Image: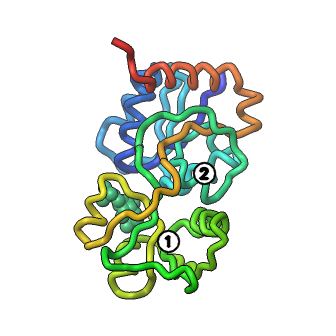
Amino acid sequence: MDMVNIALPKGRLGEKVYNLLKSAGYPCPAIEAESRKLVFENPEAGVRYFWVKPSDVAIYVERGAADVGVAGKDILLEYGPDVYELADLGLGRCRMCVAAKKDFRDRRDRTLRVATKFPHIAGRYYAGQGRDIDIIQLNGSIEIAPILGLSDVIVDIVETGKTLLENDLEPRETIVPISARLIANKVSYKFKHRQISALCGRVQEQASPRLP
Ligand code: PRP
């Protein structure tokens, strides 16, 4: 039987995702041992896991190097990969927000300078409001931009709100709630349909909150 190739986002979210898959019946003992390896397989469970950079998961899945993967809704909205979104895993919940310095007063007659790692999400959001913006694309530590006067606002992910708070910024608007999604390559979904739909069903059973 063909194994299902699964791209996991390296890091905290990936560990939670692996634990979910494990409890759904797809364990891989090798992955649990401390190591720098990136590929692990468990033929008995029919799975091969890869650790990849979270923002790259959708690329592996879109091109078929992985059959399925787990990516944040932020990445799916930003890059619009041509994949199937099979399930909301309810992990990695956060929201995409506009945030600004506490004393920032917006003037709608001025072009708004927006620093972000998500230029498409920000662009669409402000286009929907008919607002002219100047996007400043950064790769991380976005919160610094308004502090140094590089931008008026930021569009970024807020989870606990701690990073904003500790940098004297505040959330102003929520653009969209975000969580981790199980995605599948379109060709794999057809040719490994039985395995992928079984995996999706079992994972969803584990992911959904149990009723008392
Ligand atoms: C994300 C996001 C915020 C922070 C929000 O950063 O860009 O900086 O988490 O979390 P909080 O609301 O719980 O404080 P990440 O760790 O991905 O790093 P980077 O964006 O600076 O690369």
**Who is closer to the viewer here, 67 or 13?**
13
Residue that extends furthest to the top in the rendered view of this protein: 212
Amino acid type at circle 1 is Thr
Judged from the image, the quadrant occupied by ligand 1 is bottom left
The quarter holding residue 201 reads top right
* Residue at 68%, 52% in the rendered image: 81
Is 3 on the left-hand or right-hand side of 114? right
Reading the image, the residue beneath label 2 is 76
Find residue 116 and name its label: 1
Residue that extends furthest to the left in the rendered view of this protein: 166
Marks 1/2: CA distance?
16 Å
* Residue at 45%, 82% in the rendered image: 151
Indicate the position of residue 210 as horizontal and vertical percent values: 38, 17
Indicate the position of residue 10 as horizontal and vertical percent values: 42, 50
Q: Which of marks 1 and 2 is in front?
A: 1
- Is 13 located above or below residue 173 in the figure? above
* Residue at 62%, 49% in the rendered image: 60
